[in-house]
Amino acid sequence: MDTVTSIAVLSVLPDILHDLIFDYTLRTVALGAAVIGIVAGALGAFAVLRRQSLVGDAMSHAALPGIGIAYLVTGRKENLVLLTGAAIAGWLATLAVLGIVRRSRVKFDSALGLMLSVFFGFGLMVLTYIQRRPDASQAGLDKFLFGQAATLVQGEVRNMAIAGGLALAVLLFLWKSFKLISFDMDFASSIGYPVRVLDVLLTTLVVVAIVLGLQAVGVVLMSAMIVAPAAAARQWTNRLGVMVLLSAFFGALAGVTGAALSATQRHLPTGPTIVVCVSAIVLISLLLAPNRGLVWAWFARRRKGEELRRTLAAADAAHGGPRILIEENS
Amino acid sequence: MSDAQLDIQMIAVVTAAACAIPGTFLVLRRMAMMSDAISHSILLGIVIGFFIVESTTSPVLILFAAAVGLLTVMMVEWLQRTGLVREDAAIGIVFPLLFSIGVILISRFAGNVHLDLDAVLLGELAFASFDRFQVNGWDLGPKGLWVMGTILLLNVALVIVFFKELKLATFDPALAASLGFMPGLVHYGLMSMVSVTTVGAFDAVGSILVVALMIGPPAAAYLLTDDLRKMLVLSVAIGAISAVLGYWMAHWLDASIAGAMATMVGISFLTVLLFAPARGLVAQVLRHKRQKLDFAQTMLAIHVMNHEGTAEMRVENRVDGLDEHLHWDTQFTAQIVDLARRHGIVTESNGVLTVTDNGRQRAQAAMVR
Amino acid sequence: MTDQQFAIDVADMTAVYHEQPVLWDVDLQVPAGVLMAIVGPNGAGKTTLIKCILGLIKPVAGQVLVQGKPYKDRRDRVAYVPQRGSVDWDFPTNVLDVVEMGRYGALGWWKRPGKRERDAAMHALEKVGMAEFAHRQISQLSGGQQQRVFLARALAQDADIYLMDEPFQGVDAVTERAIIDLLRELRAAGKTVVAVHHDLQTVPEYFDWVLLMNIRKIASGPVDEVFTEENLRLTYGGVVAFMQAPNGSTAAAVDTESVA
């Protein structure tokens, strides 16, 4: 964000706060963005820890054909129908990726990139096919591509909150099991945990989180909401519970800030603004987080270097001669 | 077939071929997702270039876009090197950010100028034929064909000239470094190739579907051969075939050409995955079936041999009850004992099996690594 | 087969990995109360054998009985120490939390751990001398400390049989001593311990039972009887250099480079 924008933001801050509470559209959008941020942030923490950061990216792209096919099959355009289709498609793509990796020599990254682009391309084909059919009114389908947060209505946000709440409830209920399979799959299996079931269930919850955000943030940017809050939260804590809470908080913070900024500034699309906000949180965390942060580490290194130098100087004085410093390989 | 149709198919084939070449190395180096990242983030380069040269067709745009592509790679590597985030997360953070900045810039400053986000992301090959390359009034064909043709030639030339370096840096970066081949340089060279190819392919297939053309054909070729040269050629061929078939599918359905081409890439991959001669799923199942009988006879020989001359030999090597010891299906056990006897691997006397010399050799050969 | 009940009874087991056989018709009886080493060159199938016993890999033939029952029914009597490198040590959790995971099997997959689990975990940590590290983040541990944490987790399982995949890998001499003392204590308490072990020189000193294998079983039994020059040569294929140890038993050093 450049200085001009920052100043503009500061000067309109009171207005934003006022509107957040009293303006229907902004309040709805901000609430929606907060729900997306919380759910994606909390579940994204597990995706990142399980080295599946880019699975979110693949899932959100792969959800596209599900939307088109759900419409073709049911002839209906209610969000619930379309998003269910999206979830099924995203889920199938993930299973396809895992299947390809297990059954062939094609590696995880290739399978992911392939399924992502092929599903997306197929979705594009289906959507254009629908648009060019004479009987179909096309409005409402392509919003999933880039997301249209401004079209959110209160009822939709309520549904999102219910679905997201359910996903989080499952996460809470199976917390211990999810933690165990994320840390040590073999051990979990050896003590009799149904690791395959738990694995698929956790993946399904991530799909739910992604699908929730499609309408507001869009296919292309939803992946950031899975990865970025979790990556930021990891820097501040060494405890899983705190990390998940922080990640949810960062997600919500970015969501609300982004929504508010884009509502008060002209030509500032919601999805990308939220992504910029969440990236800013990542950058701040990488630099400033205590212990792990880069600035912190820089100071710690300097302090250590000085201590070492002092010790050596003292030793030199004692022995009366220079010594060779062997650099320790850390 | 009209001229326009021919033009479109030629552009599609050339694009697919140009993408397959750097894609092969991405797949082998396990960096497939980098193409996804680059294809998203170079939007920012195009936008910046557009503000500077104020044209959507200038070749300078390619330079800006390629620069942002490289910036993406560098940012991901920097994040990774901090040790604070892993590679996959680093990719997932960097490209959405650059992409978002691109989208914001477009909607803030280019709202009234023609820089169509949909076209950039999704591509529209259908109109590519109308944009002609003309010199002094001479029509030299569609511009897209010239752009992609140039990039294709460049890619082919680079791969031929630096084949040895690329191969070594891909399969053994440590050795490459010790021989003074500078794998870092090869790496960034390759990433530049990916960036330039992606930008060029923008017009034709859109940014996200470039990924399909870069990853799909090489992934399929990877199931067909172990030879890098053959893999490159097969990738180009599979890409080209998918492109043409995709075009006709789009024509038939009256749907997005780029989308149909990506779908065809997926179908090509699926076909290869199923039917590849040695590594295909069908071949795997057939081989597995054949091996299972073969393998089970060897196992029987080893089992009988292991218990030969031991106290429990009469129990372990008895034909009835063998199924329990080996934990095999009764019918399967009977079949294997029958096969092994007919092949002269074991003989039976008084219901107890003994291994023949032939079977002994077979068992010993199997246990030598 | 006799009537004696073995802690682990592997019968005619063959296992395949990536279509390649990695275990050929292995028979193995481990009596209860022994301290057993699994010895063999790299790629001999040692880890595969342990994973087959634990049901993590399904063998193509043969079966495993634990205390006379299928593993499924005896799961709560078995503790497993995976290779240290098999998990992500940057995972955001602390030592106590990891050790507490040893109680998860008894808890079932949705019940929450409480004070009892916490106390059991603390007790296990005390046994491995890591109590003061209970609240340390796991990424800040040395290799030896990580190994002790894994051991503590196994102790917290309070099992009869302990399966350990390379418990001495990458630990310092002091930790190695501490670990072996602990394993002896377990044996003294009547437990059975099976460990993949790489250092042939210490086998006679540390263990009383041994399995020598190289995709098939070469020999198994008491160390005094089975750990012979002849068997080692069969296992390693003649690249073993033998030395006469001071106490008269045969010790051997392996040029692992040429074996691998």
Image: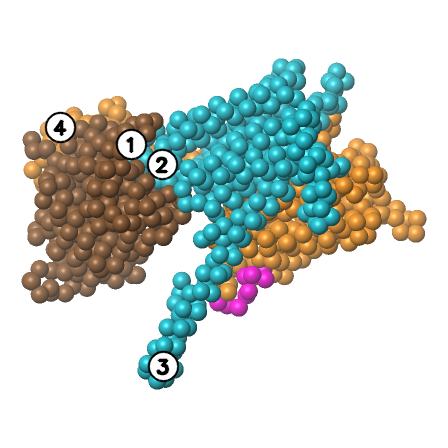
Element assignment for label 3: helix
Return the mark for residue B66. none
Look at label 2 and name its amino acid: Leu
Q: Provide the residue designation for mark 2.
A: A180
- The chain painted cyan is A
Find out whether the residues at labels 1 and 2 contact each other: C-beta distance under 8 Å. no
Chain that appears brown: C
Where is residue B225? Give x, y as percent.
Answer: 51, 46
Judge the density around disc 4: few (<14), some (14-19), many (≥20) Cα neighbours within 10 Å.
few
Label 1 packing within 10 angstroms: few (<14), some (14-19), many (20+): few
Find the distance from the CA under tag 3 to the CA under tag 1: 56 Å
Mark 1, chain letter? C
Can you say which quadrant of the picture contains the N terminus of chain B?
top right
Mark 3, Cα crowd under 10 Å, few <14 / some 14-19 / many 20+, is few
From the image, tell me which residue sits under label 3.
Answer: A317
Indicate which label's residue lies in the foreground, 4 or 1: 1
Q: Does residue B352 lie above or below C140 as drawn?
A: above
Nearer to us of marks 1 and 2 is 1
Picture quadrant where residue A119 is located: top right
Q: Residue A267 lies in magenta, yes or no?
A: no
Q: Which residues make up the magenta segment?
A: B178-186
Given this view, does label 3 or label 2 mark the residue nearer the observer? 3
The image shows residue C28 at horizontal and vertical percentages of: 16, 40
Give the spatial CA distance, label 4 vs label 1. 59 Å
